[in-house]
Amino acid sequence: MDQSAASLLSVFITGLILGMLSFATPQAIADGALCRYRDYLGSYDTPDRASAVTIVGITAYIADFRSGLQIIDVRNPSSPAFLGSHDTPGSAGGVTLVGSAAYVAEGDSGLQIIDISDPTTPALLGWHRTPGMATGVAVVGTTAYVADQRSGLQIIDVSVCPESCIADLTDDGILDFFDVSAFLDGFGNRGEVADFTDDGVFDFFDVSEFLDAFGAGCP
């Protein structure tokens, strides 16, 4: 075959391949129609927009935007199963794990640190407000490195998580009107949440303790 004929054959084959690709739908490609050695395994539809994922063992930890941290059992990829979730106050955009703690980049709510020792009932350990919009996080040792959009890189010591903030009755990492409302509602209904002196009596001393804690702020 002379060189010109070989060139024409090459152009023909290239055109044929491109033509075949043009008729392949995105779903066909996703299903492995163009690669017999790959196949679709499964999926899990999270409540909001899954922005990032970290896998440890047989568990997936997903930063799910307004739906916070979603924890999914992926031991069977064809049938992932919900384990638990934590509704964070901001927009979860990044997540990383160290030990039994998940570090979640939370948009304008900064860095949220969540106890995942029991994946079915994750609980807030602490938080750190960053000046920008936290979109990603990496942790090395006891230091967290947060991508904070226009505020650049924020470096945070996470060697000791802040203690629980007893005045944060809504458990969202923020002290505001909603915490006051929760206290007043509990006080009016003689709820345990308002018994700040832990004596079973609802009186001025509980109000005073709550106001002191609220005024001191959170660590």
Image (cartoon, grey):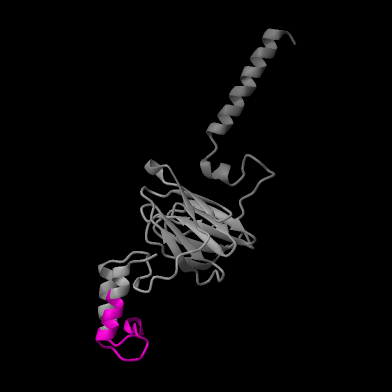
Magenta residues span 188-211
Can you say which quadrant of the picture contains the N terminus? Answer: top right
Q: Residue at x 45, y 65 (%)?
A: 162
Instruction: List x then y, in percent, for residue 212.
Output: 29, 74
Residue 56 in the image: state x and y as whole percent: 62, 59
* Residue 53 locus on image (x, y percent): 53, 53
Image location (x, y in percent) of residue 100: 57, 65
Pick the residue in front: 104 or 139: 139
- Residue 24 vs residue 213: left or right? right
What's the residue at 29%, 83% (across, down)? 206
Above or below 163: residue 1: above
Quadrant of residue 141 within the rendered picture: bottom right
Image position of 13 with respect to 77: above or below: above
Question: Does the image show residue 182?
Answer: no
Quadrant, the C terminus: bottom left
> 52 and 147: which one is in front?
147
Residue 3 higher or lower than 197, as above or below: above
Whether 96 is among the magenta residues is no
Q: Residue at x 27, y 84 (%)?
A: 187
Q: In the rendered picture of this protein, how many numbered marks are placed on residues?
A: 0
